[in-house]
Image (cartoon, rainbow, N blue to C red):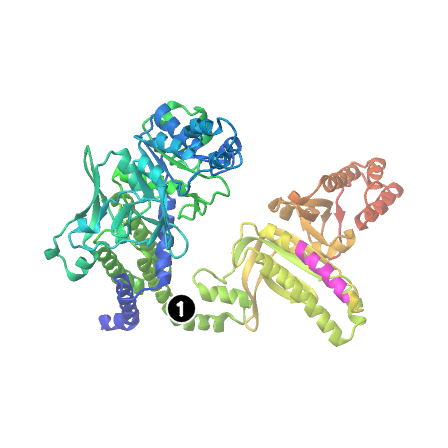
Amino acid sequence: MRWRSGWSRHGARLLLGALLTLVAACASIGIFGSDTIGRLDAMLGDMRMRVETPQLDPRIVIVDIDEKSLNQIGRFPWGRDVQARLVTQLTGHYGVGAVGFDISFPEADTSSGYGVLASLARGELAGVPGLRSQLERLKPQMDYDALFAEAMRGQPVVLGYSVSDRQKKGVLPQPAFTLADLNGRTVTAFAAPGYEANLAQLQHAAQGAGIFTALTDSDGVLRSSTLLQRIGDGYYPSLSLATASVYLKARAIAPVFTQTLDQMSEAEREHGGLDRIAMFTPRGQLTIPVGEALTTTIEFRGKGGPDGGAFRYVSAADVLMGAVPADVLRGAIVLVGTTAAGLNDIRATPVNAEFPGVEVHANLIKSILDGHFKSRPDYALAIEFGQVVLVGLLLGGALALATPAMAVLLAVGALACALGVNWWLYHSADAVLDSAVLLLLIAALFVANLAWGYFFEVRKGRALVSRFGQYVAPELVAQMADNPDRYSMDGESRELTVLFADVRGFTAISEQMTPQELREYINLYLTAMSEDIRDSHGGTLDKYIGDAVMAFWGAPVAFADHAGRAVSSALLMQQSAARLNQQFQARGWPPLQIGIGLNSGLMHVGDMGSRIRRAYTVMGDAVNLGARLEGITKVYGVGIAVSEFTRAQAPQFAYRELDRVRVKGKTEPVAIFEPRGLLADADAAELALLASWSRVLGLLRARDWDGAEAILLALPDDGLRRLYAARLQQYRATPPGADWDGVTTFETK
């Protein structure tokens, strides 16, 4: 019977969890796909890469054609004579290990003007004696392409080039391998029909060349790179692979096949069964894992650029002038590229939307040198499928039995574990695994169980509403229905802040208006005040008493800043009243003015009343003082009066001291204040005004009538000033007795 009872309560949830797990398992092994899941996996992979801390690699240095270089050398592209000097400086003066140009040179450099002079010597200036011989003598100096080629000859220099959809321009380097080298296999690779390569003169002088064309994902972000691309029958290396090959003095780059043709399935034969390429160096064979279509995941380190922290940048101008310390460049791999604005070598990457293209190659070279690649292993699908099934069944069962609070902890814990395992495999095993399906499954299980529980808890919530709806305000009922164990309507004592607001002269107002107008007048007023109390600062509306409003803060929801919320609400209510007053007067209605009293202290709060009618309300001396303060605002000509207790708990406001009063029913005096706004917003003039009022009251209490009057007369004319001017006249005419303590006593409510 116990088993049947448990199944009747939780069986449907368990079945729902199993169904969601089945759907997720199918998605994880590709039975059906989703662009949303793919985008989420890409986003998670980007976040995973961004949390890695970069470490400076001194082996790779980027010679930056930056703004400084353009200012000193001139606009880009530079003449090949400048490139020749740059190569000579790097290889001869600094002794670098290899130079990779993230630049192509597909066209001849005619910037020296030699061609124009030679044409003139054959034409208009053919009769000038010795001109042709002089040009022949100057030709070696003015043939910039020859200068550049000579500077590269015998040096570890690699040129860059791009692939193209149409044209074939320039001369390709030797391929790493060809179709003939594959012995009948077919290796899938990105294929390009055309290219824009380098001049033959330059390519023959360089030790190699590599493709720098970037292949972005569908969202325009660069996450992976080809290590080899196919052009015609040849497979040509990327700039990063070619540069690393020259640096390591590799004699060949070749595919590595782990299976013979007989051992492979039909699908494997179609793709060649290639998962690695080998670089044969004097120190041995270096193998590099490759993914689909001979690609690899780029492991971006740092945010990129001179301040990215992963690679050192030096200005090309400093290299040409020999201003770079020798130990920075000696033996290093140098990549020549640009970060200058307008030269269009910026890529959107997972770590930075404006990542220097040259640093993409630097990251790939670092991975090659370290033999450290992030890749998706062959067993990735098995791990992803196993995680989905295991987590789905365990979490689905646990959530069906858990309380709402425990369900949140379980779901958060499962998410943390899933992300933690994924990060550990990425960081420690270099395994790139997808986790979007697993995370979506965890979220779906949590939401499904929460929704299921909610629908069944609605009946319980409705019963609660039916029971307490006649006692408390609707907003309190809603909170209690959401979490009934958290709230209690039992009487208790709490530190709260109470507010009383009343319309000035409401009796006279009601006599001037028709019943319909008065109804609209009071409804508009009460609506605005209620919104300022409840919606803006989380107050609890206690009741309407005719035109008066009573509210409090700190119960049923406890607020540590209940006094600050109450003062903010009071200031907002006065602003709303001023706005309504303009609207009312525009309609020919009587003007609207309100007085507000606030007090903070220990109050009794709870469900109080009779058998016939009850209400959630507050009582106590502190409540009575708040009501008295509202009544005496009209005496002092102010819109808001707060007690010293409220002021002490809301020190973030600027206050004007009004008086020390003894209200009816109280023997102890209390200081009262008018809040003027946030203290941080008060200017020097406002602060000086408040200080002057404090001095006036201090001098009055010290019986220095003349001193108080001198300051008072300099203050702005308002109701408070007129009140104290009248009191000064009274004190002079009839001085207070010797036992006068400076307190104003009110005998009426």
Q: Quadrant of the C terminus?
A: bottom right
Q: Quadrant of the N terminus?
A: bottom left
Image height check: is 358 above or below 439? above
- The outermost residue toward the front is 127
Residue in the foreground of this view, choosing between 494 and 217 = 217
What residue span does the magenta drawing correspond to?
571-584
Query: Can you give x and y, in whole percent of width and height, for residue 454 in the image?
Result: 40, 68
- Magenta-colored segment: predominant secondary structure: helix
- Residue 141 in the figure: left or right of residue 595: left
Label 1: state its secondary structure: helix
- The outermost residue toward the left is 262
Query: Can you give x and y, in whole percent of width and height, for residue 337 in the image?
Result: 41, 38
Q: Residue at x 43, y 24 (%)?
A: 322
- The outermost residue toward the right is 733
Query: Can you give x and y, in whole percent of width and height, for residue 14 in the image?
Result: 28, 68
Residue 579 highlighted magenta (yes or no): yes
- Residue 479 in the figure: left or right of residue 170: right
The residue that mark 1 highlights is 454
Residue type at mark 1? Answer: Tyr
Q: Residue at x 26, y 71 (%)?
A: 7
